[in-house]
Amino acid sequence: MSPGKRNAALILINTALFFAGYNAMVAVFPLYVVYRGGGEGVVGLLVGLFSLSAVVLRFFLTKAAERRGQKWLLAAAVLSAGTAPLLYLLDLGLWYLAAVRIYHAVSLAAFITASQTVLAASAPPEKRGRLFGLYGVVTGLAMAGAPSLGQWVSAKWGYAAFFVGTGLLGLAMVPGQVLLKEPQGAAGQGQAAVPWREVLANRWVVSASLGVAAAAAALGGLSSFLPLYTQKLGLTQFGIYFAAFSLAYTLGGYGAGVLSDRFGRRAVVLWSLPLLSLGLVGLVRLGGYLPLAGCGLCIGFGFGAASTALLVLVTDKTKERERAQAVTFYNNCIDLGMSGGAMLLGGVAALSYNLLWVLLSLITAAGFALVLLGMPREGAAPAPAEGKWRK
């Protein structure tokens, strides 16, 4: 197996472990905050703080990775993912939880940028969509069981057992991190990164990033308030939503990767984002588990397909030495959208959950308009091949 294919395989394994812990935390953490005495506003702030902290930290970590490389950045992610969950065990108040969330955000800031940068360096453009589709598959599979399993563990054995379990998932990432080889030609390997202003002058990168930010705002609002909303309606088996979401996210992400290699990235985005809006509107008249699963399918398929196609487009439309910054900007926009959807809409959720879902649907529609109108009018197909799989 060539080093490029080996790196891709190791990244995909660690991606599954990372997102299993991440998505289990998404389902359980809001309930844990309520258990500690926080209300809806506190839940939104602490959930949003995680994503917002990742935005700030990612700039500093990416800068350090320019000197030390992507493998160093992944090591920082593994350290945070393995140790931060244990810090939640201490009951030192909500301010302490906020500090732990900031430290835990190192894992999100470092892992996603570094893993996607390494993947982009592991395959030529004509195969990149399929590879990132597989990235979406392992992410979706991690979503499928982790939230329900996390809820089951916390309900049966308590929150302490849950946090120890998520810490062990971080520890399981160590072998893959050790075996990974630093990708050649990336920043941190003797090649200086380009200034940020050059990345931000790229209309493809900016339009794709702002479009995905709007979609991510919907996920931020959902991760904070959907568990509380379903409990209010008496739908205690919230894992059904995550199962449907993850299945659709998996299929949508892989399908988008394959189809975008053939038909172009932008074409895939333009039919996937409206599905996300449709799923959000469906939550307004939620009457049982079947409609909940249906909304999860629409939201998961729409976001999985759109985010995969937009990410591959960003890697296509950037040079290798500026790719890490472009991916950083893209993921920062996702996290800003997530944090905004969680932190800024707590008052709307307290007033009316139905109003919240309609508002998030309109925000997603605005993201669709950004992608439709903001990108250059040329085709979104992959750039010419840069060569075979890296050796």
Image (cartoon, rainbow, N blue to C red):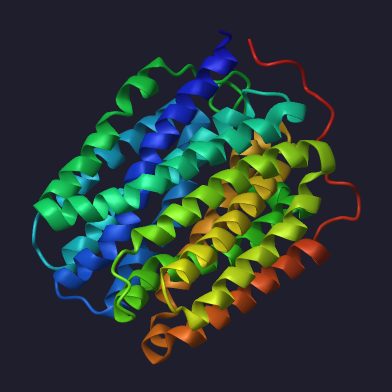
In which quadrant of the rendered image does the N terminus lie? top right
Q: Is residue 328 above or below residue 77?
A: below
Residue 342 can be seen, yes or no: yes
Q: Is residue 162 above or below residue 97?
A: above
Q: Is residue 353 above or below residue 224?
A: below
Residue 89 can be seen, yes or no: no
Between 11 and 304, the one nearer to me in the picture: 304
Between 61 and 375, the one nearer to me in the picture: 375
Q: Residue 24: image x %, image y %?
A: 31, 51
Q: Residue furthest bottom?
A: 351
Q: Residue furthest right?
A: 378
Q: Residue 343: image x %, image y %?
A: 40, 74
**Residue drawn where x is 42% and y is 61% of the image:** 241
**Residue drawn where x is 27% and y is 59% of the image:** 28
**Residue drawn where x is 36% and y is 87% of the image:** 350
- How many numbered dots are placed on residues in this image? 0
Q: Give left or right: position of 54 versus 305.
A: left
Q: Is residue 150 above or below residue 211?
A: above
Q: Residue 142: image x %, image y %?
A: 41, 42
Q: Residue 42: image x %, image y %?
A: 28, 75
Residue 31, located in which quarter of the rendered image?
Answer: bottom left
Between 10 and 139, the one nearer to me in the picture: 139
